[in-house]
Amino acid sequence: MNSSLQEYFFVFSGDGGTLGHSELYALLETYGNDFSEVFRRNRFALLRAEKLENMEKVLERGAYVLAGCKHLGNTKLDNMHTVHSIDLSGVLKDIETFRIDCYDFADTRSSVVVEGKLAAIIKKNHPQLEVSMKNPDATFVAVIRGDTISLGYSLAEKARQKWGERRPKTRPFFHAAALFPKFARCLVNLSRTKYGEIFLDPFCGSGTIVMEATLLGLDAIGIDISDELCRGSLQNLKALGLPTYTIVQGDARDIPLSSVGGIAADIPYGKISAGSGLNSRELIEDFFDNACQVLEPNKHVALVHPELVKFSAKGFSIVAQHKIRVHRSLTRVVAEYRRNS
Ligand SMILES: C[S@@+](CC[C@H](N)C(=O)[O-])C[C@H]1O[C@@H](n2cnc3c(N)ncnc32)[C@H](O)[C@@H]1O
């Protein structure tokens, strides 16, 4: 391994499956980070990079990522004293208080014991340190994976997310095809839109994706062919209490915009969200033809569509595809596309 390279690990909530990893990698890319994946297992990923930047933003924006850490080393579940061999000097400078957060991916039910033992061992070696659960100077993250514990130094605190407060049934305007906010946030991130760029959802329905993008502080625009849904979106956005939001009634096949930074959308399917009378394949292909004018080369589209709908996205390359379960019996494909240069 090149000596200037560091190891980092990330922990995911798991409900996004492979979307969680893709979302993180999209965010790291958005913030100009160069990295390689060493390995991933379900809710854990180990990466290598010279330095990861803007981790506060990456963790704040991410829907499925729970923690991001500099990897300090590994210890054994049955012999945690090997933690002594991990050099903590670099991270303990100027630190008076710390906390340990444990994730138990091996289902050992020993998180509390691990947190306590590791804290006691660290304190024994560094008696000046105090444990503080609230606002500590440093947070260590311990991940139990099989008989190994990976120990990391948290790069940023992740604020508690209030997804439940924005679920479809709590909004002033309800639409049966509305997405859940956590999933919608992930789609925004997969579009790799940067601050200062325009984010677009050209099939915005009741506005879930636009709401998440607006909450992130992006310049978000929603378009829908239905006047009723445009009004509904506006009601839902107004309820967020944010100063600016834009919803335009229009057709996703003829978008009056250029230089958009990224697009994410949940395409119409079935009777509930049809709207333009075209079948889904024709509609998506027409949308991609138009998206070539709307997006600059190398910009991204994240699209949710039914598995059965086959289409070609002319002018775009596929970056990744995920099969996901939206509701109990509803499976969808989430596909990431990059506009060809
Ligand atoms: C699956 S719904 C989007 C639901 C939305 N993500 C939400 O959370 O509420 C798809 C939307 O596409 C709209 N639509 C259908 N054809 C369209 C077109 N040609 N241009 C723009 N919007 C269209 C429908 O009116 C519908 O609201």
Image (spheres, helix red, strand yellow):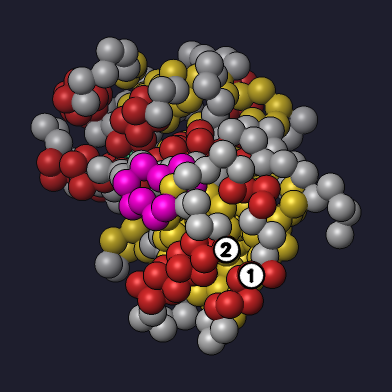
Quadrant showing the N terminus: bottom right
> Which amino acid does the dot numbered 2 rest on?
Asn
Q: Main SS type for the magenta part? A: loop
Q: Is residue 135 magenta?
A: yes
Q: Position of residue 316 (x, y in %)?
A: 67, 39
Please tell me the numbered disc located at residue 84. 1
* Circle 1 Cα neighbour tier, 10 Å, few/some/many (<14 / 14–19 / ≥20): few
The image shows residue 18, relative to residue 218, as above or below, that is: below
Labels 2 and 1 touching (C-beta < 8 A):
yes
Residue 7 drawn at (x, y percent): 70, 56
> How many numbered marks appear?
2
Residue 185 circle label: none
How far across and how far down the image is residue 193, in percent?
54, 29
> Is residue 38 left or right of 198 when viewed as pictured?
right
First along the sequence among labels 2 and 1: 1
Name the residue nearer the viewer: 333 or 70: 70
Residue shown at 56%/26% (left/top)? 194
Which residue occupies the foreground of this view, 302 or 155?
Answer: 155
Relative horizontal placement of residue 327, taking residue 144 as reference (left or right): left
Percent position (x, y) of residue 238? 19, 20
Residue on which the image places disc 2: 125
As measured in the structure, the alpha-carbon distance from the residue carrying label 2 to the one carrying label 1 is 8 Å
